[in-house]
Image (tube, rainbow, N blue to C red):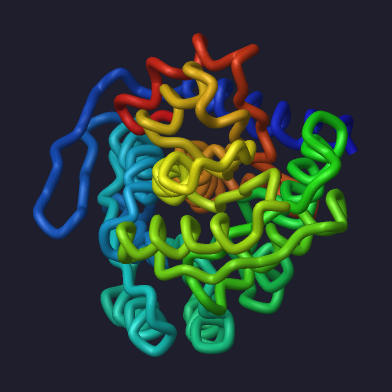
Amino acid sequence: MLSIRKVGVAFAAGSLALAMAACSSQGGAQNQGGSSSGGGGEAVTGGKPLTIAMITHEQAGDTFWDKIRAGAQDAAKAHGITLKYSNNENGPENATLVQNAIDSKVDGIALTLSNAAQVIPESQKAVAAGIPVVAFNQGIDDYKKAGAKMYFGSDETLAGQTVGERLTKEHGGGKTLCVIQAQGSVALEARCAGVKQGYPSTENLQVNGADLPSVQQTIQSKLAQDPGITNIVTLGAQIALAAQQAKQSANSQATIATFDLNPDAAKAIKDGGIAFSVDQQPYVQGFQSVLMLWMNITNGNDLGGGKPVLTGPSIVDQTNIDQILPYTANNKR
């Protein structure tokens, strides 16, 4: 399992390094509405600059998506692409954004498939209209149904297994609590299912990730009810920080592990408050999605050989946090 993870991450990182080496040194300007356009590169087809739409299920207030956008914007700036970013966490509205992109005749679409039932038919319409599509972040099992040429993201079940197995090895003997902050998210459910495969004594806890004080209180109450909980796995960096507060208030000694990073979670790893993070490298997801649409449209390239390109799981702990910590401040990690 370790070798699979290393190969997937090394492949994504290697292709990113090659892409960065080829990038133009010219930058771009940030436009209103989340669009960005770059002055460098030669992203043109038929004599006009390329426009790429990126459509996600971003939840309001979730800073995870800042990393996705940073990667996408950097790729767009490097290659003279106009990037149109839009988001909605609700399925019907998410699908409408895809239809809007089709109607505006963009040159390519990068999308997430959290709301697969609603978004897949719209993605298929884009493909039928001659617009290439790539998927990222969510939809590893559905991207081919959507007609997407490539997929960039983590295998969430594999990532969960990685967490569970590490907890079993280093912190076994009690119960693990896996905290799900968005009900109905296929990716989050897959993470916890993977944790349970690696650490069988795992129980899920549903919280409202949009209300962090409520998250803290819910975890705190659960810790007070069940002193047998020795590990807490959170599925987002902001949830891990709320779990830290809950642990302190409940006088718990539980070990906290998390998925994903932000500057505060990275500092907590350095300080020992969080044992480790499983990072799916969202910056890479955003960068590669835009980059590979550009390469496909302008040069017919693809990555993955018909299989997903894995950007994670990448383990961040005290052995490598000093190298990674500086990059968390500018949304690179």
In terms of depth relative to the viewer, which is nearer, 6 or 214?
214
**From the image, which quarter does the N terminus lie in?**
top right
Query: Residue 300 at x, y = what percent?
Result: 61, 49
In terms of depth relative to the viewer, which is nearer, 119 or 21?
119
In this rendering, does residue 175 appear at all?
A: yes
Q: Residue furthest left?
A: 32
In this rendering, does residue 107 appear at all?
A: no
- Could you tell me which residue is drawn at 41 percent across and 45 percent down? 249
- Could you tell me which residue is drawn at 54 percent across and 38 percent down? 281
In terms of depth relative to the viewer, which is nearer, 13 or 163?
163
Vertical placement of residue 82 versus 203, above or below: above
Query: Residue 180 at x, y = what percent?
Result: 56, 64
User: In the rendered view, does 52 fall on the left or right side of 153?
Assistant: left
- Could you tell me which residue is drawn at 61 percent across and 29 percent down? 275
**From the image, which quarter does the C terminus lie in?**
top left
Say how many tags the image has: 0
Vertical placement of residue 115 versus 79, above or below: below
Figure quadrant of residue 253: top right
- Could you tell me which residue is drawn at 79 percent across and 29 percent down? 6
Query: Residue 250 at x, y = what percent?
Result: 48, 48
Query: Residue 52 at x, y = what percent?
Result: 36, 57
In terms of depth relative to the viewer, which is nearer, 102 or 135?
135
